[in-house]
Amino acid sequence: MQELVIVGNGMVGQRFVEALRERDTDRRWRVTVLAEEGRPAYDRVNLSSLFDGRSAEDLNVVADGCYDDRHYSLHLDDAVAAIDRTARTVTTVRGRTVSYDALVLATGSAPFVPPVPGKDRPGCFVYRTIDDLDAIRAAAGRVPRRGRRAGLVVGGGLLGLEAARALRLLGLSPHVVELAPRLMPLQVDEGGGQLLRRQIEDLDVTVHCGTSVTGIDEDGDRLLATLANGTELDVDLVVFSAGVRPRDQLAREFGLDVGERGGVLVDDTCQTSDEHIYAIGECAAMGGRAYGLVAPGYDMAEVVADRLLGGAATFEAADTSTKLKLLGVDVASFGDALATTEGALEITLNDPVAGSYAKLVVDDAATTLLGGVLVGDASRYPALRPLVGRPLPADPVALIAPSGEPLALPDDAQVCSCHNLSKASICAAIGEQSLTDVAAVKACTKAGTGCGSCVPLLKTLLAESGVETSNALCEHFAMSRAQLFDAVRAGGLTGFTAIIETHGSGRGCDICKPAIASMLASMELGHILDGEQAALQDTNDHFLANLQRNGSYSVVPRVPGGEITPEGLIVIGEVARDFNLYTKITGGQRIDLFGARVEQLPAIWRRLVDAGFESGHAYGKALRTVKSCVGSTWCRYGVQDSVTLAIDLELRYRGLRSPHKIKAGVSGCARECAEAQAKDVGVIATENGWNLYVGGNGGFRPRHADLLLRDVDTDTLIRTIDRFLMFYIRTADRLQRTASWIESLSEGGAGGLDYVRSVIVDDALGIGAELDAAMTRHVASYRDEWADVLEDSERLQRFESFVNAPDTPDPSITFVTERGQPRPTLPLAVVQ
Amino acid sequence: MSAANPLSGALDVEWCVVPHHSRDNAPLNGIQPRWVVVCPLGRLQPERGVAALVDGVQVAVFRTHDGAVYALDNRDPYSGAYVLSRGIVGSRGDVPTVASPMYKQVFDLRTGACLDDDAVRVATYEVRIADDQVEVRR
C-alpha cells in the first residue's frame, strides 16, 4: 500500500478524497489529510447562507463515513509547515511527520487585501472562512441598533456581491466599491453589468464603480472610508473581498516552480515540478493561470484521482461558467463571455423593462457558439452552456428570445458540470435503471446534486426519454392536488361522488380519498365523519386516533404550547391507569396514550373531554403542535413570552387540515430551545419582535427552516403565518411537507422562498385578502372533533369492535408488561 | 362469487340447513357452515367496512357504492393485525378494492387477491342480503 498525503481540506481537497475513495476499490492508497482549519471541508461558495438560517453544520460537504474508513484519516487544525522532498515527508505545525509516495497540495487561496491605509483597523474583515463570518456577525451584533447601519464591501466581483448579501442579512446597508467600471467584471459585460447594478441598487445596495478605497479612518465608534473619487462613507464595518491569491507558500519555500502571477505551477496532469507532488484547486497555476472557481478545481481533483490509479486523464480547458443568484438577481456567464476570441460576434437582447439581459458570443462565421451572459433571467443557462463550442442549433436570436423553444441537446453535451455527466450517460441511466423522476436521477447518477443548475435539464431529459413526469394525483384523477382543489372550490362541489363524477373516474382509492377529505375539511363543511366524508377518511381520521401495529390505537390530547396543569397531568395519568394504556412523552411536548381498542375510544375521550381536553389531531394531516421553550416568564435569557405565543398559535391553527402534517415551534431567544428551525413554521424571539422561519422538518430528510421575516411584531407575524399556511394548503401536493413545497415553487433549485415571500408578504398574486379570509373562517368554525363525536349517537356507532358483538374485544389484541407498562404482543405477519 | 346484489330480490333464508358449499373453507370441528346475521343493511355505510364475528372468525364486511356487499377475512396478512375492515374502499380499474389501513396493500373485494402481490390472497366469505339483514356464511 502506498501513502498519499493531502495538504488542505477545502471543497476541492475533499472532492479529491471522495473521488479517490470511490475508485480505489483495491485499496492501493492510504490517505492522510492534514488541514489548517479546525472544521472539516465546508461549502465556501454559500458562506452567506450562514446569516440566512443555515448553520455551519449545514454547510458541511464531507460525505457520511468518509473518514470512518481506517485507510482515510483527517487531521484538523494541523497545517503542514515543511516538506522534505528528498525524504518524501511532510511535517506539521504540531510536529506530526508523515511520509508520502504522493503529495497533493490543495491549500486553496487567501483573500487579497489591497494595501489601503487603515486596512487592519478593528472593524475590517476578510470573507473567506466560517471563522471570518463569525467575526463579521459578532461585529455587526455590536453595532448599536439606531440610525442607519452600513457596511462597506471592497470588491464588486462574485465574492464581493456575496459579502454584500451577507451584510444585508445582518441588517446593514451595504456599499460596494469596485475598481472596474462595472460589477462582476470577469463574468459580465458592460450591458449585463448595468442591469445587474440597477437591480442590485433596488435592493438597498449602493454601488460605487470605477473607483477604489484610499483610506479607512476611525470616526468615533464607526469607520470613515474615503474613496478615490472623493466620496466619504460612514460605515460600521469593512469587508475586503477583492479577489483571492493562490496560497503557494509551501511551493515557494520548498523549491517547487510557481507561476509568474502566483500559484503552484502544474502541467495538464496537475503534476508540479516534482513528480511526486501534485497541486489542485485554487493554489494551482495551470499553464500559468490560477482559477478562483470551484468547478475547475473539481476537474483537477478528478484528474489526479485518475492518475494515481493508473489512468491517463488530463485537464481539459477549464469551464469557468457560472450561474448564481446574487442578492436575488440571476447572473450566468459561460464560455467566452467577454468576446475575447478574435472576430467574435455578439448578439444582445436587452430588456430593461422586464429586467433581463442576454448576450450570445458566436464565431466570426456566426455558426459556433462561443459563450454568453445572462442577467435577470438565467433560465436558458442550463440549455445554452453545453452548446459552447458547438454549431448553433438555431438562429442565435431565437436562442435567447423570451418565447424561444427549448433546445434539443447533442448526446455528448455536458449536462452536469459538477459531476461531469453527459446527456448520453444520464439518458442511459434513465433507460437502464428505469428512472422516472428527478429525485431518482439525482440519486442514481449524482447529476444535479452539486450546484443544482442542471435540474431543469434533467426534467427535459426525462421527458425526452419518454418518461411522463405526471402530476396526476392517482389513477382516478389526472390532475394534481392543487389543480383539483382549485376545481373543487371553483365548482362549489362538496361531495366525493360529485367530485369524482365531474373531475375523475372510478370510485377512488386510499390516495385520492384522504386527499379530497383534507380539501373538504379545509372548506369547513361540517364534521369529518358526517355523510359521504366519513367514507373518505383514512383509518386514523375515521377513528380520530392513531392506528398502531397490532390494530390498537393511540390517543393524544392537545396540550397547547406544551403547557399543562397538575390537574391535567393527573387526569391523563388516571385515564392511562384505568384503561391500562402505555404512556410516552412525545417530541411535540404532549402525552401519547397507546393500546386503546376502538370500542374504548369514546369512554377514554369522555373522561378527557370532561376534564377540558380536546383532540390533538395527532391522527390527522393537520396542525400537530406548537412547541415552545419556557420563554421570558421564567428563563433568565428569554427576550419574549414564547409560551403565550405558542399557545395562541396552536389555538389559532388547531384542527387545520393540510396536505401533510404541520409542526410549529416558538423559541424565546436565539438559543432556540424549542428547535423552531426544525419546524414547518418556526418563530424565534428577538429583542425587537420575532423572526419567522419556514420550511423546516425533522424526519427522513432533516432540514432547517429558512428565514422569511425578521424582527416583526406579533400581528404581522400571525398574518404572515396565516397566509403561509393557507397558500400551502391550497397549492401543495398530497403528502408534501412545506420544505419540498417551497422547493417545488423554485426555478432551477433557487428562489422558492422568494416566490413564497412575494405572494404572502408582497401579495404579488393579489390573493392575500382571500387567504386571510379563509383563515378567519377556519378560526371561527373550529370545533373539537371529539366533543362533537361524543354528543352524536350516530357518529359514536362506528366505535365498536364487531358490528354483531360490540362489547367483545378484538381477541387478537393482547399485551405483556415491560418496565411497568403494557406492551403489545405482536401479531405474526403471514407475508414479510 | 361472494357478492350479493340487494336489488336482485329476496333470497331464501334457511337457517342451519344449507349444505356445505364447494368452497376453500372446509367446515371446522365438524361445525356446518351456516348463514349468520351480521347486522341490518343500513349499518353498512357505502364505501366502508365493518368487522363481524362469525362463528369465532373475524370477517370484514364491505358495501360498495353500487350497493354490492362483500366479505373478506379481517386479518391483514402483511401486519397480522385484524384491520382490513377499516381500510379505504375504492376501485382499481374495474376492480372493487379495499386498501389495508396498515401498509396500504390493495385487495380485490371479489376474490381477496392482493393486487400488489400475486402470491397473496385473503379468504373470502359468502355474503347475502335477506330481509334487509346482512348475512355471512363461512
Image (cartoon, coloured by chain):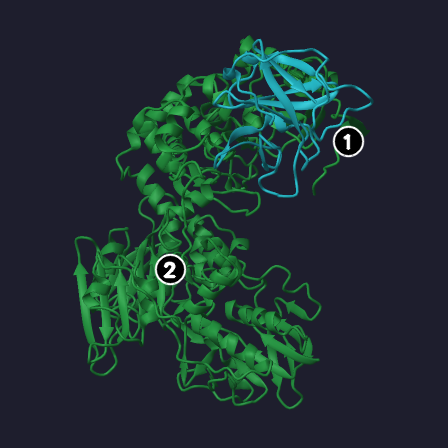
Q: Are marks 2 and 1 in contact (CB under 8 Å)?
A: no
Q: Chain of mark 1?
A: A
Q: Which residue is disc 1 drawn over?
A: A825
Q: Which residue is disc 2 drawn over?
A: A464
At numbered mark 1, what does the secondary structure look like: helix, strand or loop? loop
Q: How many neighbours does mark 1 have within 10 angstroms: few (below 14), some (14-19), or many (20 or more)?
A: few
Is residue A42 placed above or below A555 in the rendered structure? Answer: below
Determine if residue A119 is in view.
Answer: yes
Going from N to C along the chain, the mark reached first, 2 or 1, is 2
In the image, which lettered chain appears green?
Answer: A
Q: Residue at x 38, y 53 (%)?
A: A750
Q: Which residue occupies the foreground of this view, A473 or B52?
A: B52
* Count of numbered marks: 2
Q: As shown in the figure, which amino acid type bears the numbered disc 2? A: Glu
Is residue B43 placed above or below A392 in the rendered structure? Answer: above
Residue A105: x percent and y percent? 55, 78
Task: Chain B: give its colour.
Answer: cyan
Is residue A698 placed above or below A154 in the rendered structure? Answer: above
**The C terminus of chain A lies in quadrant:** top right
Residue A795: x percent and y percent? 54, 13
Q: Which residue occupies the foreground of this view, A120 or A188?
A: A188
Q: Residue at x 40, y 77 (%)?
A: A318
Q: Chain of mark 2?
A: A
Residue B58: x percent and y percent? 70, 23
Is residue A814 placed above or below A636 in the rendered structure? Answer: above
Residue A823: x percent and y percent? 76, 30
Q: Which residue occupies the foreground of this view, A230 or A748?
A: A748
**The N terminus of chain A lies in quadrant:** bottom right
At numbered mark 2, what does the secondary structure look like: helix, strand or loop? helix
Q: How many neighbours does mark 2 have within 10 angstroms: few (below 14), some (14-19), or many (20 or more)?
A: few
